[in-house]
Amino acid sequence: MGKTRNSPDLIMLIATLALLCIGVVMVYSASAVLSYHDFGDWYYYLKRQLLFAVLGVVAMTAIMNVDYQVWKKLAKPALLGGFALLILVLVPGIGAVRGGARSWLGISSFGIQPSEFMKICMILFLSKLLSDENHRITDFTKGLLPPLAVMGAAFGLIMLQPDLGTGSVLVGASLLIIYAAGARMSHLAGLGMIGVAGFVGLIIAAPYRLKRITAFLDPWSDPLGAGYQAIQSLYAIGPGGLVGLGLGASRQKYSYLPEPQTDFIFSIISEELGFIGAGLVLVLFTILVWRGMRTAITAPDTFGSLLAAGITGMIAVQVIINIGVVIGMMPVTGITLPLISYGGSSLTLMLVSMGILLNISRYSR
């Protein structure tokens, strides 16, 4: 192809590793009490997070040196594999139920979330499809409907688990790729209105989602029920002030705040490290998104550009939803903070995705 390979984007790499290091430290700080209470081991969650962090960095380093064009050839098999896993996890006796959702495959505490795997598979497939048939994207029937149908099928299977948070990230990243490929705004606006109507339908169909919406609007109307998580998160953020209570000094992690090492880890960061620590995390994510979009703009071909935009969009949407929930700006959804929250599947696949993005940056103009 005549492409010149350079060094990977150093700023992006440093921001990624910095967020990963902050995540490992904060997972230990947020989970130590819970680890000892549940398993008699202060380091239970830390050891697992370190294991997946090391595996993820090794995978990221290897993938960073593999030409991203390889993923174009693997896009269709990966998508089929993703759909197979999403179907398999719904089978009783095979898929494991955790946190009220049948979203895990595996044994005991080690397992994978097919929905996490599907996010990157969908990004790869849409990037290939829309780069191969970019000239059709302005045609609603032949260009826009096929990728929307594939995205809708994946979203539907994820909602059967149910997992609205991950489904929302998948849809957000997919729509960003479709928009970047040149879809008409009139088409997307019309679909957006249909999507809002569908979202309202999903909320009405599940009473617990409606409770989350009402709790989001007024969490103190049900402080021990639907509004509990939001209130405890704000109780963690408030005392943090400018510099925080100090690393390890969180009070909310003592069984007050649910999931302090996963969905609400940003609350613990705000409580222990204050506005300065939370601000640093936000700055690092901003740098990551900036360099990712820069890579998408300067990529040497359409596939690389769409792939970089999709991965960057996935990170951005996930960060916005997670932090929006934590600070009370969005209804509670179970979604992790990329590179920081505890979780083997999400952390490993996020580092794999960063490896692909860093490889694209090596060929950027």
Image (cartoon, rainbow, N blue to C red):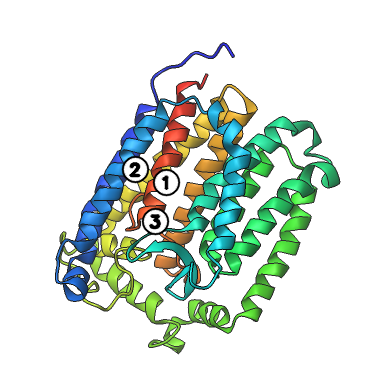
Q: Which residue is mark 2?
A: 56
Which percent across, then down, holds residue 14?
31, 34
Q: Residue at x 70, y 68 (%)?
A: 198
Which residue is the site of mark 3? 337
Dividing the picture into quarters, in which one does residue 184 lie?
Answer: top right
Q: Are marks 2 and 3 in contact (CB under 8 Å)?
A: no
Q: Nearer the viewer, residue 87 or 56?
A: 87
Mark 3 secondary-structure assignment: loop
- Mark 1 and mark 2 lie on one chain; the one further toward the N terminus is 2
Number of the label disc, if any, that sits on residue 350: 1
330 to 302, vertically: above or below: below
Q: Residues within 10 Å of mark 1 (few under 14, many from 20)?
A: many
**Does residue 122 appear in the picture of this structure?**
no
Other-residue count near label 2 (Cα within 10 Å), few / some / many at <14 / 14–19 / ≥20 = many
Q: How far is mark 3 from mark 1, CA to CA? A: 10 Å
Which amino acid type is shown beneath numbered disc 1? Answer: Met
Looking at the rendering, which quadrant does residue 207 occupy? bottom right
